[in-house]
Image (cartoon, rainbow, N blue to C red):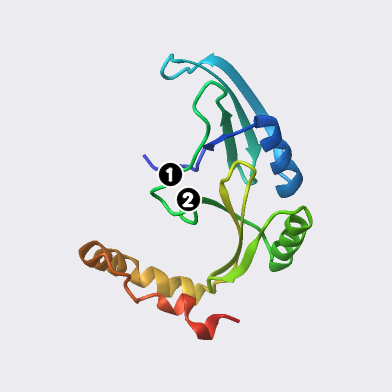
Amino acid sequence: MKIKQIHHVAYRCIDAKQTVEWYVKHLNMDFVLAIAEDEVPSTKAPDPYMHVFLDAGHGNVLAFFELPTQAPMDRDHNTPAWVQHLAMEVETMDELLAAKERLVAAGISVIGPINHTIFKSIYFFDPNGHRLELAVNTGTPEMMQRLDAVKWEMLEEWSQTRKAPKHAAWMHAPEVKA
């Protein structure tokens, strides 16, 4: 077996309608499906929910659950807020900058663009507190080959030392911050 693609990624949301409207307005996603039940099909637990699905392009689907009878939504406080995020790709740097401009004009705080050498990104939060990233690829085939050549060595070194291997430190070196 080999995974074909991700069918959908699901997160919890505070308000399904507000979430759908936010993603349609700010990220131009299409609302494609809603499912609501009083019982969880997999566990048979009595737990009413609204499950909404948005088209994130190229067969990628982003979904959300609103769970009105559960404790208020919260984040994992043992994990820094910058770690758990959803990164979505845009085609060009112009699109990335235009998206930032639209988000900022709508009162959404945006960090970036940040230069990661092989891509540039902006970061912001949705109304549920989920961190989002929009990225545009900027890496050359040579850069990608260089990273590919050291991935297993880096992983092995990390697994033994839990210290950041320096094989790809060039990605965030000051000389590439242009």
- Between 55 and 12, which is closer to the camera in this rendering? 12
Tell me the mark number nearer the camera, choosing from 2 and 1.
Answer: 1
Q: Give the vertical position of 171 relative to 50 (above or below).
A: below
Q: Amino acid at mark 2?
A: Gln
Q: Pointer 2 and pointer 1: residues touching (CB < 8 Å)?
A: yes
Q: Answer left or right for 66 relative to 44.
A: right
**Spot occupied by residue 151 in the image (x, y as percentages of width and height):** 34, 67
Q: Answer left or right for 177 relative to 44.
A: right
Q: Give the vertical position of 112 relative to 52 (above or below).
A: below
- State which quarter of the image contains the N terminus: top left
Q: Identify residue for label 1.
A: 76
Residue 162 is drawn in which quadrant?
Answer: bottom left
Numbered circle sitting on residue 84 = 2
Callout 2: few (<14), some (14-19), or many (20+) C-alpha neighbours within 10 Å? Answer: few
User: Is residue 25 visible to us here?
Assistant: yes
Residue 80 is drawn in which quadrant?
Answer: bottom left
**Spot occupied by residue 106 in the image (x, y as percentages of width and height):** 77, 52
**Spot occupied by residue 161 in the image (x, y as percentages of width and height):** 22, 67
User: Is residue 8 visible to us here?
Assistant: no
| Nearest to N terminus: mark 2 or mark 1 | 1
Identity of the residue drawn at 53% across and 20% down:
69
Secondary-structure class at tag 1? loop
- Between 155 and 172, which is closer to the camera in this rendering? 172
Q: Amino acid at mark 1?
A: Asp
Gap in Å between the C-alphas at discs 2 and 1? 9 Å
- State which quarter of the image contains the C terminus: bottom right
